[in-house]
């Protein structure tokens, strides 16, 4: 009888742990720039205005707003931010190779 209870408890713990890990992976799976973007997008319109960025503590984003805003519409969308991050990563990799 004790072994059945022990087995039942072990199964409950196993499933509870697996579920928590799955939820954690969903949250952790988002790139940092997407998490940051979603947090800063106060009006949830899918783009960041200069005012939304200025209210944040993201100094680099404030400094580079114009450079990130590729289509010069005075907003940054996720695609522009992703492209900028990719460009900077490539520049950094090229600098390391020299």
Image (cartoon, grey):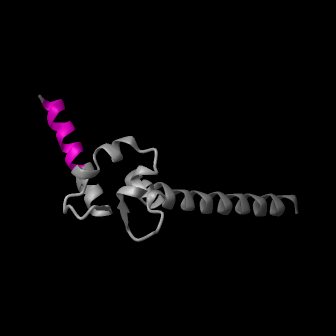
Q: Main secondary structure of the magenta part?
A: helix
Viewer-closest of 17 and 56: 56
Q: Is 22 located above or below residue 87 in the figure?
A: below
Considering every residue shown, the one lying at the far top of the view is 98
Marker count (numbered): 0
Left or right: where 6 falls relative to 81: right
The x, y position of residue 40, in whole percent, is 45, 57
The quadrant the N terminus occupies is bottom right
Q: Which residue appears at 23% of the width and 56% of the height?
A: 83
The quadrant the C terminus occupies is top left
The x, y position of residue 63, in whole percent, is 31, 43
Q: Is 27 located above or below residue 56 in the figure?
A: below
Q: Which residue appears at 17% of the width and 40% of the height?
A: 91
Viewer-closest of 98 and 5: 98
The x, y position of residue 46, in whole percent, is 38, 69
Please state the extent of the stretch shown in magenta in the rendering: 86-97
């Amino acid at each position: 009888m004790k072994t059945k209870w022990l087995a039942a408890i072990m199964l409950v713990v196993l499933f509870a742990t697996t579920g928590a890990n799955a939820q954690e992976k969903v949250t952790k799976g988002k790139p940092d720039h997407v998490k940051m973007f979603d947090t800063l997008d106060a009006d949830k319109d899918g783009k960041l205005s200069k005012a939304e960025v200025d209210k944040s503590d993201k100094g680099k984003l404030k400094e580079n707003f114009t450079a990130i805003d590729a289509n010069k519409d005075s907003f940054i969308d996720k695609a522009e931010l992703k492209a900028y991050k990719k460009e900077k990563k490539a520049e950094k990799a090229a600098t390391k190779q020299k």
